[in-house]
Image (cartoon, rainbow, N blue to C red):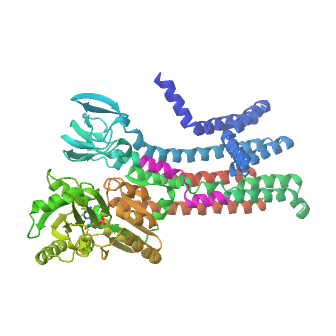
């Protein structure tokens, strides 16, 4: 019983292609009948070709006319075809009916091509989504039970057998396996994962059996969030497309008015016969229609988006694809973006009254509430026996504060701690500086036993955190320079010395350090004044304002926080920085194809208009030139599906 269902699905999805095909066959048979002289058959077959090939366009055109009181190209084409047919019937010149049918056929073909590009894009993006299973094998009191994903709770333990898809994001608590993450990252190279590593819904488990602990609700798994974002974004048309659509509406009206004038005036002005006049007016209607112009942008951008999605670059819509190609300056966040954000505590330096352990535990008490990579590192190295802080508040870009055993504790960078502490132990300060020169991030831990008098806050110690610069970062920066990006800067909330050290490693020479989230936004604004189109690449909550301000905001998919994912225009799903250069290249290619297409489209329209006015072209040539150029630009757009 599977087969008929597949067939229905197939016909539904390809109804436009089928319609074009049937229309073509009917047209051919009608033409044949006309040639052998079977006029009756021809007059049966050709109208059928009109109806089948033109049904969709006519319906769309009429809907626009009735609902929005607007004329669109679909309707113009149908009117032109029907006009040709009527003229043919009236004068007994039946080849005109064929001309009209050709018009409808080619119009149907270009429509089908556009639909094809659209579906390819949707499939590339939705391909991600269909992959997550609906149920998970949950361990309940030692028993395995299949439960719907929606019933999973944070803390549940689930089993994933070899070869199965991961049902929801989770942390491996036992087992070892290689996973294929292609579904979300576009990267099919298997990745080894073992206890403590995070696995993502929709990715494919390799040969090992895994036990996972669910650490966030299934609805907020990476893949689910991305799906929602893409669905939202896909409802918007990019500005260039909106412009073309507005243009189409006005243009369609101009054509109708001009067409009407062309029917009535020439016989009086130039003494054309009525027949010539109507014929040329119809040809005018066809060649002047901006079909090719309409097809110049969307199929191209959709193909580009599909190409990107395949490589783990998620464009939330076509506008960003156009924009990223024009980027002249790029700002990078440091932690989590240029570095892996896979940070580790490398050293704890207590001040004289405290032990390493006390410093770590006090910090962990607060950081257990934090999403920041620094926080995770501290919690991981602090062991188990600490109490969770209360009234904990994160101050993005600065630190975190809260109460531990009724004492107010502060963890954060120098600028943050300086607001509360007047006395920094001298030898501590020296070792902190030298650690920072090595590229390590150092946070201070301070506490105040009597929070009412905040001046008495004292330094407990400092924690040095090492982060690894992403291996591909330096190569990517030089590739960006080769691509002609004029300015590359780093903007970070971390201190100047650490930032300088990392910047030097990756080859960035302009560094803005010790920035609060709103300072990052200001830097982007300044860059925009100088370079207009500015991209920002970031991962954290603290990057969100800058991501929103930037002409193109780019977030890291896996490392990225929810807010960053949501604010960004482009998501690098695999966190692979080199994809940024790929995205820029793809953007430039799309942009130049769009430009070529517009030139070709306008060129054809102009040529055909002049030809028609001088009387050098007949309706079939007009139709073939016009629709041919439409198909040409559509196909040209589809080139972007290839790498
Ligand atoms: P970046 O801009 O490099 O991503 P952030 O803006 O997130 O860094 O953080 C800037 C600095 O603020 C960090 O280097 C750290 O000193 C401090 N900081 C931020 N959040 C925390 C936290 N949860 N715990 C300790 N320090 C923090
Ligand atoms: Mg960051």
Q: Judge left or right: residue 382 versus residue 23.
A: left
**Identity of the residue drawn at 27% across and 65% down:** 399
Q: Quadrant of residue 371?
A: bottom left
Evaluate whether residue 9 shows in this view. yes
The x, y position of residue 80, in whole percent, is 75, 48
Relative vertical location of residue 515 with respect to residue 104 in this rendering, above or below: below
Q: Mostly what secondary structure, the magenta segment?
A: helix
Ligand 2: give its quadrant: bottom left
Query: Which residue is at the front of the view, 236 or 581?
Result: 236
| Residue 194 drawn above or below residue 584 | above
Q: Residue at x 35, y 54 (%)?
A: 557
Determine which quarter of the picture holds residue 178.
top left
Closer-to-camera residue (135/613): 135
Horizontal side, residue 481 vs residue 229: left or right: left
State yes or no: residue 150 in magenta.
Answer: no
Residue in front for this viewpoint, 55 or 168: 168
* Left or right: 308, with 512 as reference point: right
Task: Tell me: residue 554, above or below residue 223.
Answer: below
Q: Nearer the viewer, residue 170 or 297?
A: 170
Percent from the top left, x then y, of residue 104?
69, 44
Q: Quadrant of the C terminus?
A: bottom left
- How many marks on residues? 0
Residue 544 position in % (x across, y down)? 39, 62
Magenta stretch? Answer: 226-247
Q: Percent position (x, y) of residue 324?
A: 45, 64
Query: From where the camera sits, is residue 616 visible?
Result: no
Image: 460 above or below 317: below
Q: Of all residues shown, which one is farthest toward the top?
A: 1
The residue that appears at 69% across and 41% down in the rendered structure is 59
Rendered residue at 60%/47% (across/down)? 110
Quadrant of res 492? bottom left
């Amino acid at each position: 019983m599977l087969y008929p269902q597949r067939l229905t699905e197939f016909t539904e999805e390809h109804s436009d292609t089928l319609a074009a095909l049937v229309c073509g066959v009917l047209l051919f048979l009608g033409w044949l009948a006309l040639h052998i002289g079977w006029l009756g058959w021809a007059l049966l077959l050709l109208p059928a070709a009109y109806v089948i090939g033109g049904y969709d366009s006519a319906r769309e055109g009429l809907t626009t006319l009735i609902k929005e009181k607007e004329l669109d190209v679909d309707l113009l084409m149908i009117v032109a075809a029907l006009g040709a047919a009527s003229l043919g019937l009236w004068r007994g010149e039946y080849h005109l009916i064929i001309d009209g049918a050709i018009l409808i056929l080619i119009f149907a073909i270009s429509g089908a091509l556009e639909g094809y590009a659209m579906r390819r894009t949707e499939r590339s993006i939705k391909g991600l989504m269909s992959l997550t299973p609906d149920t998970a094998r949950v361990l309940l009191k030692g028993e395995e039970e299949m439960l719907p994903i929606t019933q999973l709770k944070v803390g549940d333990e689930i089993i994933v057998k070899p070869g199965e898809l991961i049902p929801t994001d989770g942390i491996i608590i036992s087992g070892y396996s290689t996973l294929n993450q292609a579904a979300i990252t576009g990267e099919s190279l298997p990745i080894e994962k073992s206890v403590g590593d995070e696995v993502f819904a929709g990715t494919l488990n390799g040969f090992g059996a895994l036990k996972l602990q669910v650490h966030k609700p299934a609805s907020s798994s990476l893949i689910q969030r991305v799906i929602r974002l893409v669905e939202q974004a896909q409802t918007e048309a990019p500005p260039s497309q909106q412009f073309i659509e507005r243009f189409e509406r006005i243009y369609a009206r101009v054509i109708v008015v001009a067409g009407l004038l062309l029917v009535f005036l020439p016989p009086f002005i130039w003494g054309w016969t009525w027949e010539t006049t109507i014929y040329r007016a119809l040809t005018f209607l066809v060649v002047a229609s901006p079909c090719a112009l309409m097809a110049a942008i969307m199929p191209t951008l959709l193909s580009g988006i599909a190409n990107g999605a395949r490589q783990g670059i998620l464009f939330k819509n076509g506008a960003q694809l156009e924009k990223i190609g024009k980027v002249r300056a790029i700002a990078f966040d440091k932690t989590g973006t240029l570095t892996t954000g896979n940070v580790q505590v490398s050293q704890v330096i207590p001040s004289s009254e405290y032990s390493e352990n006390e410093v770590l535990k006090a910090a962990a008490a607060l950081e257990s509430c934090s999403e920041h990579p620094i926080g995770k590192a501290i919690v991981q190295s602090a062991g188990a026996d600490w109490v969770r802080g209360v009234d904990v508040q994160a101050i993005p870009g600065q630190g975190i504060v809260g109460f531990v055993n009724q004492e107010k504790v502060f963890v954060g960078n120098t600028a943050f701690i300086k607001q509360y502490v007047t006395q920094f132990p001298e030898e501590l300060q020296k070792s902190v500086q030298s650690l920072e020169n090595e590229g390590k991030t150092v946070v201070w831990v301070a506490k105040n036993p009597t929070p009412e008098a905040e001046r008495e806050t004292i330094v407990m110690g400092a924690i040095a955190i090492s982060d690894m610069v992403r291996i591909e970062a330096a190569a990517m920066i030089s590739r960006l320079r080769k691509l002609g990006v004029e300015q590359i800067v780093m903007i970070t909330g971390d201190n100047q010395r650490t930032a300088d050290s990392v910047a030097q490693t990756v080859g960035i020479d302009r560094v803005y350090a010790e920035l609060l989230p709103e300072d990052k936004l200001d830097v982007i604004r300044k860059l925009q004044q100088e370079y207009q189109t500015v991209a920002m690449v970031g991962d954290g909550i603290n990057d969100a304002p800058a991501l929103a301000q930037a002409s193109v905001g780019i977030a890291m998919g896996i490392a990225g926080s929810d807010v960053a994912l949501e604010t960004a225009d482009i998501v690098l799903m695999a966190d692979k920085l080199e994809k940024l250069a790929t995205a820029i290249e793809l953007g430039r290619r799309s942009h130049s194809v769009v430009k070529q297409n517009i030139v070709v489209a306008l060129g054809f329209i102009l040529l055909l208009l002049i030809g028609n006015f001088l009387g050098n072209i007949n309706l079939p040539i007009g139709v073939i030139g016009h629709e041919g150029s439409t198909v040409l630009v559509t196909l040209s757009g589809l080139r972007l599906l290839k790498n």
